[in-house]
Image: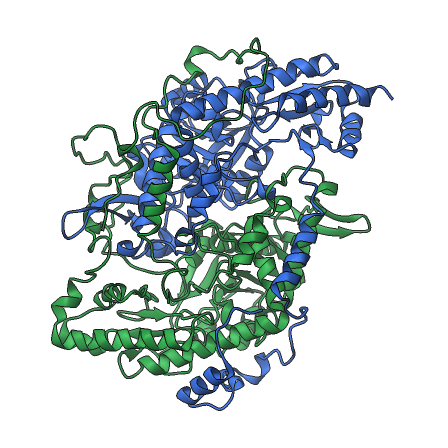
Amino acid sequence: MYDEPLLFEIGSPGRRAVALPSDDLPPEVELPAFEPELARPSLEGLPELSELEVVRHFTRLSQWNFSIATNFYPLGSCTMKYNPIVNEWAARLTGHQNVHPMWPDQLTQGALALMFELEQMLAEVSGMDAVTLTPAAGAQGEFVGIKMVRAYHEQNGNPRKTVLIPASAHGTNPASSVLCGYRCVEVPVGGDGLMHIADVEARLDDDVAAVMVTNPNTLGLFERDIRAIADAVHARGGLVYIDGANMNALCGVTRPGDVGADVLHINLHKTFSTPHGGGGPGAGPVCVKKNLAPFLPVPRVLQTDNGFKLSEDAPLSIGRVRTFHGNFGMLVRAYTYMLGLGGDGIARMTERAVLNANYLRRKLEPLLTLAQTAPCMHECVFTDQGLADTGVKTMDVAKRLLDFGFHAPTIYFPLVVSGAMMIEPTESESRETLDAFAGAIARIVAEARKDPELLKTAPHTTRVRRLDETRAARRPVLRWRPAAPVATEPVVALELKEPDPEPALDRS
Amino acid sequence: MDYTPHTEADVQAMLAEIGIARVADLFAHLPEDVRLGRALDIAPGLSEPDLRARVAALASRNRAEVLSFVGAGAYAHYIPSAVDALASRSEFATAYTPYQPEVSQGTLQAIFEFQTITSILLGTDLANASMYDGASAAAEAVLMALRLKSGRARDARGGRVLVARSLHPSVRDTIKTYVASMDDVTIAEVGFDGSGRVALDDVAGNGDASGADIACVVVGYPNFFGIVEDLPAIAAWAKERGALLVTVTLEPLALGLLTAPGALGADIAVGEGQGLGLAPSYGGPGVGLFGTRESFLRAMPGRVVGETVDGDGRRGFCLTLSTREQHIRRDKATSNICTNHSLCALAFTVCVSLLGPGGLRDLARLNARKTRYAALQLAATGLSERFSGPTFNECVLRGADVPARWDRLVRRGIVAGLPLGRYYPELEDSLLLCVTDVHRRGDIDRLASEWRAAGGS
């Protein structure tokens, strides 16, 4: 495969790609006078290229990626479904792109109506009362949600101290809770992969501000005790946070708001199909029950007799979490998706996501070891236990899958499963694709018995082979520099006690 | 329209393989009392033409055609055609976080290039793979400064945060929200003087008089009024007190003309990248820029991409230093941030690559001069500059009857800047005007003549 140098290693000094807007000012209009120190002496180091060089560079880079558009991407918990092209068209309409966030409301009624209607659709799907579209991502949604939990308890005279989080949770759950001043108490996961009411009750006291539950959980299992857990937490004055990362399994079947949730976030880039973008931008709306509505972040979208307006008039609000109102471009895409699917299509989306997951689970059962045998929802988790005698590990299976043109599952997550492979096919994939994936796994399992070295040295067909991630962490090179620098250890002011990272620990 | 490929025969065959009779049986293990038991109350789905008609009708209710002179953190600039063509490629747009580096080298190399360009523009040793936006990047910078000040890699304790009143109001509000749950952290506001710059003598708050308790000073560069702060003086002031300097640049194009904040003493330089390559899009998504010193690397929030080699010794890139991050460290992470704004960072990188150093400098100069031209034209209508400090592409103008004239112009399809009374009661008679390369000279002349006419009635 061809090599493509860095932007900074191609081009030539003085070369320019674009002609700038013309200077139509009278020549006597001068630059403002800065202190000499404030006038930039140089922009040295920035690339100097022709348009073709830029186009070829980034087109080549794009071809080194796996993506939903090019490959089956069964990354568990990430909901890598098809991202419809019409949503991209919608986000690029002049009436959406060229709208300024600080314009008066009378010029932005379309945007406000879109946000209002999207809030209503999300409230209906989740069974909640009020919605904020502001958070930029799921993690920022969690931060907003837990901040509201804290504001609610403070309003009642005591912020409380802890948040209960199951061991199977995403890492963002504890990190977000700590950011809001809470200590996390881990609830163990039962032998059946579920969170049990008895384990919650054993840790429940008047210091518990909330329980944070992902449902379905990261094993792809529906938390059967959810209603009882919610009742128990409520009885002690605590609140229930549902992490809606896996909402794709629930739409039209059950609603978190009907089974005890006080607050939940939804990842629009998962369930509602906005493209993941290689790691964002996403959007993480937060839905709440009436009891938490006064604490929602600002601004809020309000419907009045004179149309829609943005309001910051909310004295109990947790405040603002970003410069403007939300990742509007992503909201347009999610709105277009939901409107296109409609209530019937949204329900069918969930049915077929669960159908595909259970079908693939059945196809893979004879080949790999299931972490849990109970029926799954939108994803299923396998382990590498059955391959122990071959020395082949989950990492090797994942890397070998790349050679067959399939993206790897999420691996080594959830942490409660040793050597986990978390597989989420989504509703977008055809039976033939699922069969082909199962076929690849069958071949890999056979290879593990016959030629394990082939797997341990995989991938063999990709742009690069396995990368030395330890070296990347030990001697961080985080940017290009003009001359080859003498390799030195960075001066580390705040050396963490923990060792450098283990090889990539995948999760999403 | 639901984008699922299943034929009825597929569904039946798959159910048979699973060993159940009906689709509903997939959910048979859910307790009876958690089921919705009715259809969702959302209108039925639409065909693509009907969907496009609905969405286009809604978009047309936004008055995108008005002549706008509003900046205030979101900037309309010329965006070369190649930016969207490249950044919208499905191979970039529909990839996930590059957890499998062997099949994500495109995204990873582009982020490494983004980190390099961002470090050059900010003048910092290094930059991360991007944050959500300018305000959340500023809030994360404050949390990082508090951690550094208290000598702890995480769960910082105590300290005073000085925030310039001339910093964007939304950025100040966001910082407040992020630190509100921290005990012993206070925020004090520092006022501005007649030049529109930070008045360092005006350090409010009840902290230690020596200033030794100040964890960081946060200023805009340029600030909300479009004024270029005297960064060397502020840096010296902060250094004397052992405080870190955090700069916030919401208009990245300004860095084509202004000395990089990192070169003038900023310890953490953050910003918003939207102005280079991204449309305003009603305020999002943008891309948070975050740069700092190498010695602070392990206290930095957010993802980073590093260079390494593969098994054959070839150069390659991967996510690195993840022991700072939530997916490894959980409750002990430097931040809860999980994603970056990768696709927006890509658009920013493509845009800067197309402009190059010469284009960036010339475009920045054009912006600064257009703003000067507008200030001169408007001076003839009775609007005078409120502050004496040097501006980039925004300036504050005051005059008689500002709110009423501004209203009249909105009705005539011109948004003559942002009236400031709502954000600064002391600037009730002023507005913040932004002029960029999207404004032709005729647009500016029209603004001046309409403003004059609006006062005549």
Vertical relation: B76 (above or below) B447: below
Q: How many marks?
A: 0
Q: Position of residue B387 (x, y in %)?
A: 62, 16
Q: Position of residue B105 (x, y in %)?
A: 29, 50
Q: Position of residue A9 (x, y in %)?
A: 26, 33
- Name, please, the residue furthest toward the front: A52
Task: Residue A222: tell me if it is visible.
Answer: no
In front of the other: B41 or B295 = B41
**Identity of the residue drawn at 22% across and 76% down:** A443
Vertical relation: A228 (above or below) B131: below
| Rendering colour (chain A) | green
From the viewer's perspective, tell me whether residue A389 is left or right of residue A351: left
From the viewer's perspective, tell me whether residue A310 is left or right of residue A470: right
In front of the other: A275 or B120 = A275
| Rendering colour (chain B) | blue
In front of the other: A419 or A345 = A345
Q: How is the model colour-coded?
A: by chain
In front of the other: B172 or A90 = A90
**Quarter of the figure with residue A454:** bottom left
Q: Quadrant of the N terminus of chain B?
A: bottom right
Q: Position of residue A453 (x, y in %)?
A: 12, 67
**Identity of the residue drawn at 41% across and 27% down:** B243
**Identity of the residue drawn at 63% across and 48% down:** A317
From the viewer's perspective, tell me whether residue B219 is left or right of residue B294: right
- Name, please, the residue furthest toward the top: A28
Vertical relation: B207 (above or below) B298: above
From the viewer's perspective, tell me whether residue B195 is left or right of residue B444: left
Q: Quadrant of the C terminus of chain B?
A: top right
**Quarter of the figure with residue B441:** top right
Task: Residue B8: tell me if it is visible.
Answer: yes
**Identity of the residue drawn at 43% across and 84% down:** B14
